[in-house]
Amino acid sequence: MTQSSSTLTPDRQRPEAAAASPGPGTSPVRAWLAVIALSLGTFSFVTTETLPIGLLPSIGAGVDVSVGTAGFLVTGFAAVAAITAAPLTTLCGRIDRKWLLAGLLVMYVAGNLLATVASSYGALLSARVLVALAHGVFWSIAAAIAVRLVPERHAVRATALVLGGISLASVLGVPLGTMIGQRSGWHTAFAAVAAIGFVVLVAVLFLLPNLPAQGSGSLAALPRVLRNGRLRVAVAVTALVMIGHFLAFTYIAPYLEQITGISEGMVGVLLLVFGAAGFAGNFVAGAVVGRSVHGTLTGALVLMTVSLALLWAFGDSRPAAITLLVVWGLAFAALPVGLQTWVLQLAKEESDAASSLYVAAFNGAIAVGSLAGGLLVDSAAGPRAVTAVAAALTACALLTLLLSARGTRTRDRAPSPTPTKA
């Protein structure tokens, strides 16, 4: 077997940290319930990250700032998570994972409770920063913890279940949070997500066994994992495709209204369709990633690039736009599962540190993509341009993936030098 095939092979080549048993006395039912709790935690964190999007006008009015300034509650959240995920995760490398999760969830609940009583922009922003600090670390360790809880053959399934919280947040979290905020006030929406976080905290305390840390707990872990060239490729692919996705998706509403001619009331329905397609695609990805990580990522990137390019060309046709939106949702759903699995396979001894780099790239992409998309939408190019630029970025991600795989195969086929006699 070549080195590249072992790198991109599913569960059998998981990092040793993932293969560790949670310990005696942990029943399979309890283990899977703990994985579901982690999925609910992912759902709650992602919902909180994007919650202000549907409530920006009311939040801006409530704390007396413009809608654009209120938008920094999302962009700033993503930026803080991106900057702090890697260093904080490595510094927490020696803390038992159960109690680290509990501490992060306490920060999550506290931050959202502070948001429920915030009466000024500064107070609300401070509450968001507190949650963002926990967000990056939680996302960095959640998938690695999940695969430690289940048998090795179920590792990809557990990863898909945990990351399914991302799609579920798109389908249910953000729409429901927006609805609650519009009917009962935005403070109530933050109270609702705080309540979900408290449920996850209780579940973690009762369901998770003690999970001794397996990281170094030192910032020196970051330079070590960065020396892994394949991991750098994985992080680069993540950054490119996620910038492209959020550049276009953040402004899908003006695109559908101005280019496709969809009414404002139907935009929400189509976003639910997109989220539902992603939710289904997430679990399809869980099955196919187990066969080939590289093949899954390649297929998803091809579909996403083609769908975005065709949206740019034929977005003024309603049937075409709706169909391509579904394809986009299906393709995108495979990427978090595939990329996270790839990262875990590439980092055998410092999986948390490696995952934190992936999380940093993901959240940094949210900030960069949404900012760049806003500049494009406000420019003469208009909303149509976001799909063209997004397609170009995902094409670059695809090319990077293909070239890295080709380079790996070339190195693997190269003959070993014949030793010479002294």
Image: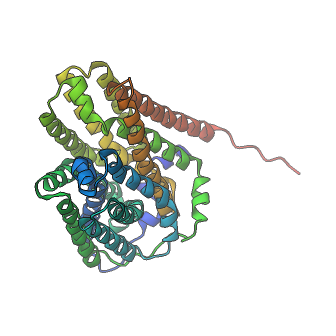
Q: Is residue 275 visible?
A: yes
Q: How many marks?
A: 0
> Front-most of 328 and 288?
328
> Front-most of 120 and 233?
120
Whether 26 is drawn above or below 281: the answer is: below
Whether 33 is drawn above or below 406: the answer is: below
Decide if residue 257 is on the left or right side of residue 246: left
Spot the residue most to the right. Answer: 422
Quadrant position of residue 300: top left
Query: x, y (%) of residue 310?
Result: 31, 22
| Residue beneath the point at 47% across and 58% down | 356
Q: Is residue 305 visible?
A: no
Color scheme of the displayed model: rainbow
Query: x, y (%) of residue 211?
Result: 39, 75
| Residue beneath the point at 46% across and 46% down | 8
| Residue beneath the point at 46% across and 43% down | 239
Query: x, y (%) of residue 84?
Result: 48, 60
| Residue beneath the point at 34% across and 45% down | 68
> Front-most of 186 and 145?
186
Query: x, y (%) of residue 287?
Result: 29, 47
Decide if residue 75 is on the left or right side of residue 179: right
Spot the residue most to the bottom. Answer: 25
